Structures are given as structure tokens and as C-alpha cells.
Image (cartoon, rainbow, N blue to C red):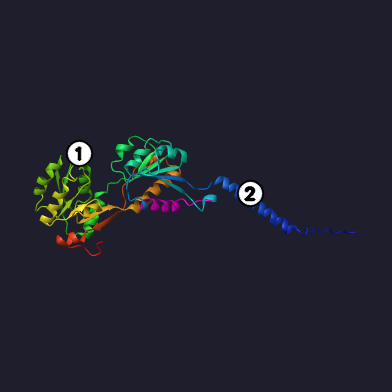
């Protein structure tokens, strides 16, 4: 007699299978949470002095989220940014002490005073912005990098050629001890322009050197060189400009109200983006000391149209 045995699945098998699948998925997710920790970094922004820093911080935060989006429980607030204003927030406490209590992953130092206040912190990476001559502060510290405040001459003169295409001869007075490299870089990067460069070792020499530039230049280039660009000399530059119908190119918009025709300065938002890229490199394993200090990569141009009209200048279409 032959017996047939039919193996039947329990009527609740599909439910059991679904439960097992859910358990397996939960286990996998738990393992992933351990392997891939939430990407949410603590960042302290130290501000020193009355700086136009809001745009920088905003652009920095937005770009960092794009590069390093958070995972896990910090997704809603991916990166926490704590701001410390040296002038108002410390109440006798040092910036270093406050930062030590916060234990951040990164310090963003905005301005010279901010960098001075954190330069002796060696256990936390630091990125500086808006600091003139940072090398005098940073020295040999290996946890600090940043963005140079100097505007590359090529970026400046590309803007000049864009809006004042008739400019071919550029006059500049400079202190060789401070600015030789800038003048040489300009001549190297823009060989199509003629640079009439006159050296000075003191502010007293500036008026006499300007006399030598009469009739020889189409534009006067103002440098961030304290020897030749200071309250003693500014009037001489702008008097020369009006008397000789020669525009002054400045490195800061504040000089437009004094008589400069145009100013090519740094783009704050782009600077914030650059800083975020440095931060992302640090967060993904590159020590700050191995990241070279960056040059400004973008600029913005402002024009004093009252001055350009008085000087009889023809601006190219599209001038701001």
C-alpha cells in the first residue's frame, strides 16, 4: 500500500517570513548605524572686530551641507555652528577657555583678532579668513590653514580689461620690501599690459613719484601696501586722478567714496565656499597642516559712476 505524504506549509508561514525579514532589516540598519556614524560636526566661529562676516558664515554652512550631508539622528541639524564674538560674548573668559568647553571639531577664525585668540590651540584644526598677513600669526603651527586676503593681480586686471578695455599702461607706487612679489606677479600674468612701477621706501616720496607718472599711464593701481597707501598719501593719489583724468583702481570699496573709479575686492560668499571645502577635506581625514593656504578664487567689482563720468571714461557694456 502506497502512502502519499504531502508536506503542507503552516497557515501562518507568510506572517513568520515577514517577521523574519523585518528582523533582518532591523539588524542590518543597526549595523549600518554603527559602521556609518552620523555626519554632524561641531564648529565654532570666532569673530574679531566689525567684519562683513554674515555672508561668509552663511555660504560656509550651506556649502558644507552640500559636500557632507548628514546621516542619522543629526540629519535635521547636520552641522552645529556656535559663534563667539570677541567683543561681546566672553565676559572676561578667554576664547580658548570657551572653545575648550565646547570641544568643537573645527574652528573658523574670522579676522586678525580672532586668529590671534585661537592660534595657541593646537588640538583643533583652524581655518582663518579675512586676515591680513596671516603668516606673521600662524608661524609654524601645523593645525592651521586658510584663505589669503590678498587679491591675485590677474583677477584684478581681468576685471579692469573687462570694464575699461582702453587701459594699457598701469602706474603703481610700491615699497619693494612689502610688495615686489605683487608687482612682479602682475607683470608676469598680464604681459599685454605695461606696468610703470616706481619704488618708494616712505610715504613722503609718493607725491614726487606721482609727478613722474604724468602722461605715462592710463590707470593708477592702489596697493594694500602700508608704506605707500595710508592716510598721508590718499589725497595725493586722488588729486593726481582728477588732474590727469586717470582712474584709480582700489582694493577695497571704501576707497570709492574718496575718489577711486573702481574697486576689485574679494567675494565673501565665494570665500565661505572655499572655507567649507577646506573643512570637508579636514573632516574626511586630511590634516589641516597638509592643506595649502588658498588664494581667493573669485572677486567682485564696484564702480563709482560719478567719478568715471567726471573723468570722461568709457565703460564697457554690462559694467556694474
Q: Label 2 vs label 1: CA separation?
A: 66 Å
- The part of the chain drawn in magenta is 55-71
Residue 35 relative to residue 263: left or right = right
The image quarter in which residue 165 lies: bottom left
User: 289 above or below 38?
Assistant: above
Question: Does the magenta stretch mainly form a helix, a strand or a loop?
Answer: helix
Of helix, strand and loop, which one carries label 2?
helix
Judge by depth and name the residue closer to the eye, 175 or 229: 229
Mark 2 or 1 closer to N-term? 2
Of helix, strand and loop, which one carries label 1?
helix
Report if residue 217 is visible in the image.
no
How packed mark 1 is, by other alpha carbons closer than 10 Å (few <14, some 14-19, many 20 or more), is: few
The numbered disc on residue 83 is none
Query: How far across and how far down the image is residue 75, in percent?
Result: 51, 52
Residue at numbered disc 1 = 177
Residue at numbered disc 2 = 27
Query: How far across and how far down the image is residue 320, in percent?
Result: 26, 61
Q: Residue furthest right?
A: 1
User: Which residue sits at x=33%, y=37%?
Assistant: 138
User: 131 above or below 255?
Assistant: above
Judge by depth and name the residue closer to the eye, 236 or 25: 236
Amino acid at each position: 500500500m502506497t502512502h502519499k505524504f504531502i508536506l503542507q506549509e503552516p497557515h501562518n508561514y507568510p506572517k513568520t517570513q515577514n517577521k523574519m525579514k523585518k528582523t533582518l532589516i532591523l539588524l542590518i540598519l543597526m549595523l549600518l548605524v554603527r559602521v556609518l556614524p552620523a555626519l554632524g560636526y561641531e564648529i565654532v566661529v570666532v569673530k574679531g572686530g566689525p567684519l562683513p562676516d554674515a555672508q561668509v558664515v552663511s555660504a560656509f554652512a550651506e556649502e558644507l551641507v552640500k559636500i557632507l550631508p548628514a546621516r542619522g539622528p543629526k540629519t535635521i541639524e547636520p552641522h552645529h555652528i556656535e559663534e563667539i564674538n570677541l567683543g561681546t560674548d566672553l565676559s572676561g573668559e578667554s576664547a580658548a577657555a570657551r572653545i575648550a568647553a565646547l570641544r568643537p571639531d573645527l574652528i573658523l577664525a574670522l579676522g586678525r583678532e580672532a586668529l590671534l585668540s585661537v592660534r595657541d590651540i593646537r588640538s583643533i584644526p583652524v581655518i582663518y579668513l579675512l586676515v591680513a598677513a596671516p603668516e606673521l600669526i600662524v608661524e609654524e603651527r601645523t593645525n592651521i590653514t586658510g584663505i589669503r586676503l590678498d587679491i591675485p593681480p590677474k583677477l584684478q586686471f581681468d576685471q579692469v580689461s573687462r570694464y575699461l578695455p582702453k587701459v594699457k599702461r598701469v602706474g603703481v607706487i610700491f615699497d619693494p620690501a612689502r610688495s615686489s612679489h605683487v608687482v612682479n606677479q602682475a607683470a608676469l600674468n598680464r604681459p599685454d599690459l605695461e606696468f610703470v612701477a616706481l619704488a618708494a621706501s616712505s610715504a613722503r616720496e609718493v607725491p614726487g613719484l606721482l609727478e613722474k607718472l604724468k602722461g605715462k599711464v592710463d590707470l593708477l593701481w592702489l596697493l594694500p601696501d602700508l608704506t605707500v597707501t595710508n592716510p598721508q598719501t590718499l589725497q595725493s593719489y586722488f588729486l593726481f586722478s582728477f588732474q590727469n583724468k586717470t582712474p584709480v583702481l582700489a582694493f577695497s570699496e571704501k576707497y570709492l567714496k574718496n575718489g577711486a573709479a573702481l574697486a576689485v575686492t574679494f567675494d565673501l560668499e565665494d570665500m565661505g565656499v572655499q572655507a567649507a571645502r577646506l573643512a570637508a577635506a579636514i573632516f574626511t581625514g586630511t590634516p589641516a597642516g597638509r592643506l595649502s593656504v588658498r588664494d581667493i578664487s573669485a572677486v567682485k567689482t564696484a564702480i563709482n559712476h560719478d567719478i568715471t563720468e567726471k573723468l570722461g571714461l568709457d565703460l564697457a557694456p554690462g559694467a556694474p
